[in-house]
Image (tube, rainbow, N blue to C red):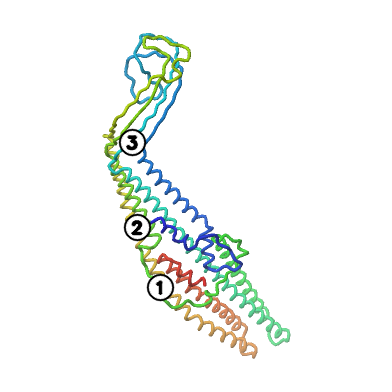
Amino acid sequence: MRHGAARMWVAIWAGAVPLPAQLTLTQAVESALHNYPAVRVSQEQINAAAAGIRLARTAYLPRVDAVAQVNRATRNNVFGLLLPTQGVIPSMSGPVIGSNNFGTAWGSAIGTLVSWEPFDFGLRRANVDSAAAARAQSEAALVRTQFEVAAATADAYLTLAAAQETVRAAQAGVERSETVARTISALVKAELRPGADGSRAEAELAAARTQLIQAEQAAEVARATVSQFVGMEPSKITLAAPRLAELPTDQNAAPLDIAVHPAAREQNAVVAQAQAQLKALERSYFPRFYLQGAAYARGTGAETDGRLLGGLNGLAPSVQDYALGVTVSFPVTDLPAVEAREAAQSATVRAQAARAQQIATDLRAQWHAAVATLQGARRIAANTPVQVSAAHAAAEQATARYRSGLGNIDEVAEAQRLLTQAEIDDALARLGVWRGLLVVATAAGDIRPFVAEAGQ
């Protein structure tokens, strides 16, 4: 994935997002992509990966080491071998003078060493490619994070809209129950109906109010979820979603192209990164060639015959040297370790490739399930108006029969409950179609068309 593609969502939802009094779906998604911390985490991971590329490219530059030292030390020296794997005993240069005393002299040194690899059998290039693959994977992770945040925000928005529709239907049910309770109360006071009918009407009214309270509770919970994404106080969130009150146009489901799904693209980038790391390992078991140049100077206050010059002699470097050469190093015994690392990385590549296949299989199954969900939601939305109409007629007939003395309170209560539930089902059925479209768009990997249509 190219660097610009990783900012696909940022380009669409860029800039600071003002938060209006009434929040549309488009504005909610824009705000979430701008404010939600998970997006900023992914963006900073891209910055870190880009710095990793710059670090890998520094391997092409020469290495320059400089040192300067002043010391006051004894000059006793002996023959004999000292194994190199120690850093405690300082090295000593000069002849053995056959004495052992604690007289000291000044010593000084200054020097520079330049090392450069003229060629490396592709190792540095492989390391740069590995770092670039890591950045591509971070960019793909950003796109996937932005997609998931946008989809979650849209889902939370629809959940709040559905909860509000439930509140409206429950409120209408309470109002009808209050009307019925007042009517029955008047009939009871006129001794035209028994007192038990009044008690039953009050019980039905209390049950309707409980249903309304539960609906309001669900709405506030859904509002809090939306606020988590958009960065607004829940009490300030008011939805502006007139389009969601209508049925969406009957159109074909968003087609599935697994290759463009953010989850699949991220996993493909993970596979590419693992392959790049394997290539770098394959280039690691080669000789390393260094062109080296050194220039240095030393000073000492001790003579080779054992005399000490005294004073400030040796504080300033007085003897100069330089050297040019080629160094070749080859870790001969590292082959088993390199082969083991290559085998482990090869297994990682195969595992990530298998995971990519698994993701593709899962996405295909999710898309088919989403299409089936959408088709079922459309059929339900086509049936609920019939349910509402019949429930209205049943409620009116039950009320009329009760007033004329031909029915009982049970028929009225049942009809009222049926009507309230039918109105809730009808409101949720329309939103169910919108949710089905969102699920299909999420499974297809692109919710922008859905947001554009639903957020009008």
Horizontal arrangement in the rendering, residue 412 relative to residue 286 (left or right): right
- Which dot marks residue 215? none
Q: What element carries label 1?
A: loop
Q: Residue 125: where, in percent of width, then height?
A: 32, 45
Q: In which quarter of the image is residue 401?
A: bottom right
Few, some or many residues within 10 Å of mark 1 (<14, 14–19, 20+): some
* Residue 196 visible at all: no
Task: Please state the horizontal and vertical placement of residue 40, each as a whole percent of the image.
Answer: 50, 54
Residue underneath mark 3: 116
| Secondary element at tag 2 | helix
Q: Which residue position is annotated with label 1?
A: 253
Question: Which image quadrant is residue 141 in?
Answer: bottom left
Rendered position, 236 above or below 192: above
User: Between marks 2 and 1, how big is the CA–CA gap?
Assistant: 24 Å
Q: Does 325 sit above or below residue 177?
A: above
- Which residue sits at x=54%, y=62%? 31
Q: Which residue is drawn at 34% across and 34% down?
A: 115
Residues 436 and 328: in front is: 328
Amino acid type, label 2: Ala
Vertical side of 270 occupied by 21: above or below: below
- Return the residue at label 2: 356
Say which element carries label 3.
strand
